[in-house]
Image (spheres, coloured by chain):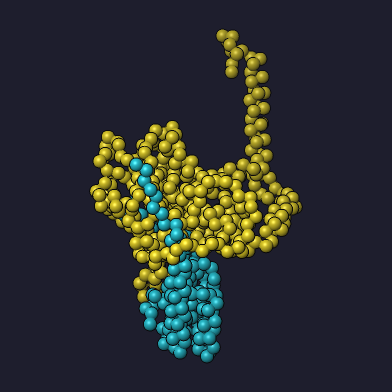
């Protein structure tokens, strides 16, 4: 250990680490990586999104190694990612290609395509189930044979398109041309930043931090009071394409899961188009609806208030979980030298004050 | 017969054990093979076009693995998601096998067809699982 003027302690550090490893591995001896990914799906997905690296098995291994601590697992995965080369940047992905596993449109009863609940407990009472589960017991068969899937069912048109058709939404396409996206992995972003930087920052932000910031933006001291309506939430597969190095044509090398959200904003500002809505966008790796919804709402809040309030700076500089928890965690490391220096400063001030209190200024007042 | 890109897509998705077994079979005749790019694990950065402003942004990285070989004077390339180096090397060999028009080409196409069928079956299974959750909430007036 070599931090902040302290050294040594190797035997104790190794013993502490061994304690973690032995207890953890004994408890999880029968836990296969696939079991971790399957049983703790949402935790694993959250880790992938916050680390910015999609691979279920690797994220599952990180989750297990971190004893279920999502932030620690994110740290492990981000560190793993940092030593991997970038093989390619994908061809631009059109989210309209998402094959949905879940899709709900809370704003509209009959959107194009189905309201598909998918795998969720959103509509179920939160009651702790302490019954012993028997995974081998067969589930009852569904009562009906589902209709064959159509493109409209698996890749439904987005709600935003419906609003566009009704001429009810502010048009932003083409406002900034086709600028190269900001690459946060290589260059940190500082305000004022392009929208691509803010979207990237939010897509890998810590979920709780982003939700907290969203809640602050609607109820907090910044005065960014705004209506909140959720247009659409989706979870599904997106294709990943790269250029084939021999033919130069796009080739699909696989697909990954992502969560997408659209937030509808009722414009009411003096300078705004009050007869229209505006839409914010959220997209993150894996299944993490809380994060995508917070992101979509913060996207629209940032468009409206980002430059006139601290919001853009907060989004760019305070939402990365690795930054914030890294700073917090480092406080646990020995700070003997820095604190001793603070103590000595206090003692010096006190000694100085005591010396000076014995001498008075010419007009008789104590010098402070 | 698949296009080069369609074949690459299906080899990217094919069962790893089947890929390796078929690649071993193709190389069994002792044809000269050279690894041009050893299987390398890295990231493909996912670039997304946001549908609101039609602007691109970087969503994050997807773990991937790629390899390139030369077999009987023809180059083969493969990329797969994940970190299975043996599988991606096998896929590159199979791509080269077809490019070289060698005897294993038909078997490679057959593996691609099986992969295509397996994907369709998986899509059907997935839909059968989620279709019962299609809902029509009633509106209270």
Left or right, A272 with respect to A321, comes to left
Q: Residue at x 60, y 45 (%)?
A: A329
Instruction: Identify the image quadrant of residue A255.
Output: bottom left
Provide residue B106's location: percent of width, then percent of height: 44, 86
Provide residue A333's location: percent of width, then percent of height: 65, 44
Residue A170, compared with residue A179, is above or below; it is above
Residue A165, compared with residue B41, is above or below; it is above
Which quarter shows the N terminus of chain B?
bottom left
Q: Residue at x 37, y 78 (%)?
A: B3
Provide residue B24's location: percent of width, then percent of height: 54, 84
Q: Residue at x 37, y 37 (%)?
A: A226
Judging from the image, what is the letter of the chain drawn in yellow? A
Which quarter shows the C terminus of chain B?
top left
Q: What hue represents chain B?
A: cyan
The residue lying furthest to the front in this view is A143
Would residue B56 be visible to someone looking at this image?
no
Would residue B134 be visible to someone looking at this image?
yes
Q: How many marks?
A: 0
Left or right, A337 with respect to A176, comes to right
Residue B41, compared with residue A297, is above or below; it is below
């Amino acid at each position: 250990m070599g931090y902040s003027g302290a050294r040594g302690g190797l035997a104790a550090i190794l013993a502490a680490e061994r304690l973690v490893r032995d207890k953890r591995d004994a408890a999880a001896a029968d836990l296969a990586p696939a079991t971790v990914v399957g049983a703790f799906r949402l935790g694993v997905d959250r880790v992938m999104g916050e680390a910015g690296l999609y691979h279920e098995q690797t994220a599952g291994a990180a989750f297990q190694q971190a004893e279920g601590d999502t932030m620690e697992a994110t740290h492990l995965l981000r560190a793993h990612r940092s030593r991997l080369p970038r093989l390619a940047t994908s061809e631009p992905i059109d989210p309209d290609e998402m094959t949905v596993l879940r899709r709900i449109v809370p704003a509209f009863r009959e959107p194009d395509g189905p309201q598909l609940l998918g795998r969720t407990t959103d509509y179920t009472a939160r009651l702790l189930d302490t019954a012993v589960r028997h995974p081998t017991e067969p589930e009852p068969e569904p009562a009906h044979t589902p209709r064959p899937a159509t493109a409209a069912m698996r890749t439904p048109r987005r709600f935003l398109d419906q609003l566009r058709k009704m001429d009810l939404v502010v048009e932003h396409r083409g406002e900034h041309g086709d600028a190269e996206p900001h690459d946060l992995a290589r260059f940190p972003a500082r305000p004022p930043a392009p929208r691509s930087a803010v979207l990237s920052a939010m897509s890998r932000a810590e979920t709780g931090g982003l939700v907290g910031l969203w809640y602050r933006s609607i109820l907090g001291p910044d005065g960014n009071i705004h209506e909140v309506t959720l247009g659409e939430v989706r979870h599904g597969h997106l294709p990943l394409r790269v250029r084939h190095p021999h033919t130069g044509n796009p080739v699909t090398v696989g697909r990954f899961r992502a969560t997408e959200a659209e937030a509808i904003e009722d414009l009411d500002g003096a300078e705004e188009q009050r007869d229209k809505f505006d839409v914010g966008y959220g997209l993150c790796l894996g299944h993490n609806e809380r994060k995508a919804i917070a992101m979509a709402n913060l996207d629209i809040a940032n468009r409206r208030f980002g430059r006139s309030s601290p919001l853009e700076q907060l989004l760019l500089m305070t939402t990365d979980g690795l930054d914030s928890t890294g700073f917090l965690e480092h406080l646990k490391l020995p700070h003997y030298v820095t604190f001793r220096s603070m103590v000595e400063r206090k003692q010096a001030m006190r000694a100085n004050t005591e010396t000076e209190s014995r001498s008075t200024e010419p007009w008789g007042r104590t010098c402070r | 017969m698949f296009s080069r890109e369609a074949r690459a897509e299906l080899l990217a998705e094919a069962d790893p054990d089947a890929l390796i077994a078929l690649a071993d079979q193709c190389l069994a005749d002792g044809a000269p093979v050279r690894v041009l790019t050893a299987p390398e694990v890295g990231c493909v950065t996912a670039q997304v076009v946001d549908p609101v402003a039609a602007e691109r942004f970087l969503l994050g990285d997807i773990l991937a693995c790629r390899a390139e070989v030369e077999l009987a004077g023809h180059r083969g390339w493969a990329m797969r998601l994940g970190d299975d180096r043996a599988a991606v090397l096998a896929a590159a060999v199979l791509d080269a096998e077809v490019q070289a028009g060698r005897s294993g080409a038909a078997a490679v196409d057959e593996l691609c067809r099986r992969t295509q069928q397996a994907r369709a079956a998986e899509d059907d299974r997935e839909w059968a699982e989620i279709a019962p959750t299609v809902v029509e909430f009633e509106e209270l007036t």
